[in-house]
Image (cartoon, rainbow, N blue to C red):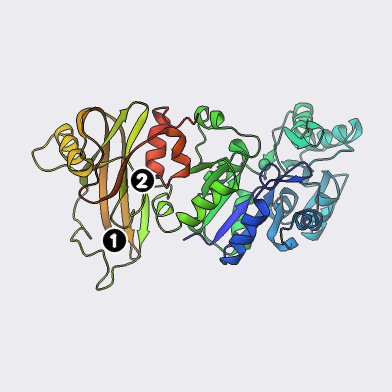
Amino acid sequence: MIQGVIFDLDGTIYRGSQAVPGAAEFVAKLAERGIKVFFVTNRSNRTPESVCTQLRSYGISCTAENILTSAQATARHLRSGSVFFIGEEGLERALLEAGLTMDPQSPDYVVVGFDRAVNYTKIEKASRLIRAGARFIATNPDKAINADGGISPGNGAIVAAIATASGVSPVVVGKPERAIIDIALERMGLTPEHVVLVGDNLETDIKAGINAGIRTVLILTGVSTRKDVLESSVKPHRVVEDYEDLAHVVFDTLETAWQETSTDNTTILPTPQQGSHFTSGKEYPDCPRLAVGAVVIHEGRVLLVKRGKPPAEGLWAIPGGSVELGETLQTAAEREILEETGIKIKAGDPVYTFDAIQKDGDGRVRFHYVIVDLLADYLEGDPKAGDDAHDVRWVHPSELDRMNVSRKTIELLRNLRMGRAE
Ligand SMILES: [Mg+2]
């Protein structure tokens, strides 16, 4: 169950001085449902209060308590000691509020944040202090920022100058490092499995979410594109075009899709009660079971089934089923796909394998399948839901993001370059 959403700001909530369409309405809907909202920004120069004022101007209700800047995260990360810093008001206030002291002569730390008044003297001073032994801390590594007039140098450019001059690489606190997300979770009072991060940048937002062990949604309203997703090794759990899509993902899939999107393939289920629907005899098996899936692509569309059984009920996925004793993977796939979908196939080689493990609240394994997906050729037949399926369809890649598709299926299709939208 999602209990909180962490948003990036620039490119996600606003672009330059304009709000991203739908952002305010979406944030309001989350609040209505009692889902905690939190904003995390790598920008270190602004105070939470000034960020709040901007958000309120878009109709987004907020308090300084649900905003975390990289300046605050840096101050929290350092905890105590003396500092020389390069930065603006937001960083200075965050450092002082956290109880750090200013020492321009022999500080413990040189902290570098975004500073529009940076100059040669400041870079020289910082470099000399670092060479003399002060620890080099960067609030964030962003190379560039979006400004109303176009792209402007970000803090990464200032940090790079000092790293070059001092010969020392900084410790980075902001995204993509997990420290800033860990601090956000602590302030929200939530654990990673109950929180989703929404951001526009694969290399900072999504990477930070993955590093912190939380689920991520890339929203295509800012810097990263669908092409970047295909080419990058950083894979978000979901990709959405806009807030309308995001609402579908978050509100329609709360109980199903997200359950199986934990990053280690393990899902925690409630311990079975008498009369629950988990009384099929599958709970507490004594060994893993083998299952097979089939990727059937026909005229540019892939065959998907809408699962009919909990806990993945309502989730679209590659069709498949159990391998019975004496069957090969191929004969099992051909039999299962015919029973489940009415489609006759010729099964080929494995293209993907994964474990699906579900444990109950006591940590006992209720369900463990080793699943092997095979590439298969379509032979004949029309899709017709059989067995445990609610529905069966040929799905065009451009439809995937709008459907409630299992993360493993998305991953698999991306690997096969099927996830491309047109
Ligand atoms: Mg952003």
Q: Between disc 1 and disc 2, whose residue precedes? A: 2
Badge 1 marks a residue whose secondary structure is loop
Q: Depth check: give the residue in front, 32 or 167.
A: 32
Give coordinates of residue 81: x percent, y percent.
Answer: 77, 54
Seen in the image, is 143 located left or right of residue 201? Answer: right
Measured from the top left, where is residue 371 in percent x and y?
A: 27, 41
**Which circle, 1 or 2, is nearer the viewer?**
2
Q: State which quadrant residue 151 falls in.
A: top right
Q: Is residue 71 above or below residue 413?
A: below
Residue at 22% over, 48% down: 288
Number of other residues with Cα within 10 Å of mark 2, as a class: few under 14, some 14 to 19, many 20 or more: many
Q: Which residue is mark 2?
A: 316
Res. 117 image quadrant: top right
Q: Residue furthest front?
A: 382
Looking at the picture, which amino acid does disc 2 mark? Trp
Residue in the image at 74% along x and 33% along y = 144
Of 33 and 72, the residue lying toward us: 33
Q: Residue at x 67, y 47 (%)?
A: 21
Q: Which residue is mark 1?
A: 364
